[in-house]
């Protein structure tokens, strides 16, 4: 008797793997977890103090559905300061985490029969959100470094194209779209009149000389077709606080506000005050995290490419590596399942992201844990190779 819309939803593979790994840990197993995508750092003290102050001030009641005015203004100021985007507070909506923001966008923009272009590999929830909105995901290939190009996008445009999802830096690959290609994609969106959902949750996690570019900052035409989604979760190690935000055309933000009023109402009042401090307060913690992730990124990339049967493109952003494991002769699901069972290392199968050749490893963990995990993967692969060789003899 379940509704068809929930029958067709696939559970989140990232959360499922993380739950399995944590359960094994509870059972006393020494598991190395490369699963869930959240910083291993603690929320900065100034942010926690702001939340405590909100509690002590009895700021524990309903707020406006779309967030307190101070936080909406702070988001607008942040977008102007960091992204060269000019938004009024009325064009900003605060929601219960970045995932909630994205869900609101899909429900407010997509209709039955619409098409949403989704570059592969993609974050697991995009496809499900599109389908829940009764639209059709149109999968778009990327190049050998997981980068999207305007030519690839153009191949997928039809009269039904309503939206393109642009996630740069990308989860799961860490790829950052080339700025010239972003400009050409903007031209396509203007020419064919479709929205660009720009998920910029990893914007600060870029390494070397590669930088993030907000597509909506290019000109007013593309800004009017851009719906920007972000959150404080990754940038400030606030995954559990559940504060995300959207900036976009006023009519879309208003529709999302109406939708949110009948689903969650306002985000948590206390978390909103914490997010306000995160955006307005010192940013030293962000720089420290990025520096640590850069060191881990280089370390895990080198180690992965040193394992027989595994090759990995160097990630440019976010905190994920997405190695190709197809030469091991295993699908991503078999590789992930056996690795967890036999070597107690948790990774996410790439099939959840649209590629059965790959697995995802989050390097949002210490160098020590990365080293332990990579040692186990290397030993496991070597043992498997020896076993196959003995069977052939």
Image (spheres, helix red, strand yellow):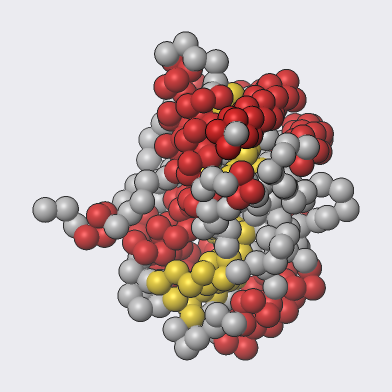
Q: Quadrant of the C terminus?
A: top right
Question: Percent x, y for residue 184?
Answer: 72, 79
Q: Nearer the viewer, residue 146 or 40?
A: 146
Which residue does the image show at 26% across and 59% down from the upper left?
5
The answer to whether residue 138 is left or right of residue 144 is left
Q: Is residue 126 above or below residue 139?
A: above
Which residue appears farthest toward the left when viewing the image? 1
Which residue appears farthest toward the right when viewing the image? 209
Q: For residue 112, what is the image quadrant?
A: bottom left
Q: For residue 219, what is the image quadrant?
A: bottom right
Which residue does the image show at 33% across and 69% down from the upper left?
134
Which residue does the image show at 88% across and 53% down from the upper left?
209
Question: Percent x, y for residue 109?
Answer: 43, 71
Which residue appears farthest toward the front when viewing the image? 393
Can residue 157 be seen? yes
Q: Is residue 15 above or below residue 259?
A: above
Question: Percent x, y for residue 56?
Answer: 49, 21
Can residue 384 be seen? no
């Amino acid at each position: 008797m379940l509704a068809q819309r929930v029958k067709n939803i696939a559970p989140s593979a990232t959360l499922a793997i993380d739950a399995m790994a944590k359960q094994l840990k509870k059972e006393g197993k020494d598991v190395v977890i490369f699963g869930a995508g959240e910083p291993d750092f603690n929320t900065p003290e100034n942010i926690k103090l702001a939340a405590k102050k909100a509690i002590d001030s009895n700021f524990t009641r309903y707020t406006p559905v779309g967030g307190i005015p101070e936080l909406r203004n702070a988001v607008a100021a942040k977008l102007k300061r960091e992204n060269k985007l000019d938004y009024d507070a009325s064009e900003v909506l605060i929601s219960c985490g970045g995932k909630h923001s994205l869900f609101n966008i899909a429900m407010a923009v997509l209709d039955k029969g619409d098409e949403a272009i989704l570059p592969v590999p993609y974050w697991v929830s995009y496809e499900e959100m599109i389908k829940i909105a009764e639209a059709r995901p149109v999968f778009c290939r990327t190049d050998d470094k997981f980068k999207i190009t305007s030519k690839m996008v153009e191949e997928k445009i039809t009269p039904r194209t309503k939206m393109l999802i642009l996630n740069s830096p990308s989860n799961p690959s860490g790829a950052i779209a080339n700025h010239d290609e972003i400009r050409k994609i903007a031209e396509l969106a203007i020419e064919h009149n479709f929205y660009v959902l720009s998920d910029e949750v990893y914007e600060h996690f870029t390494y070397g000389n590669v930088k993030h570019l907000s597509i909506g900052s290019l000109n007013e035409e593309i800004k009017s077709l851009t719906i920007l989604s972000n959150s404080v979760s990754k940038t400030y190690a606030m995954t559990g606080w559940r504060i995300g935000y959207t900036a976009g055309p006023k009519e879309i933000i208003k529709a999302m506000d109406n939708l949110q009023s009948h689903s969650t109402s306002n985000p948590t009042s206390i978390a909103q005050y914490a997010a306000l401090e995160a955006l307005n307060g010192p940013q030293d913690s962000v720089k420290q995290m990025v520096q640590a992730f850069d060191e881990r990124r280089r370390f895990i990339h080198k180690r992965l490419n040193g394992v027989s049967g595994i090759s990995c493109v160097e990630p440019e952003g976010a905190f994920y590596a997405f190695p190709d494991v197809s030469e091991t002769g295993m699908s991503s699901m078999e590789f992930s399942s056996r690795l967890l069972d036999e070597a107690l290392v948790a990774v996410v199968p790439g099939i959840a992201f649209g590629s059965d050749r790959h697995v995802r490893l989050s390097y949002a963990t210490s160098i020590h844990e990365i080293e332990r995990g990579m040692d186990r993967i290397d030993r496991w692969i070597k043992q498997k190779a020896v076993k196959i060789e003995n069977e052939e003899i």
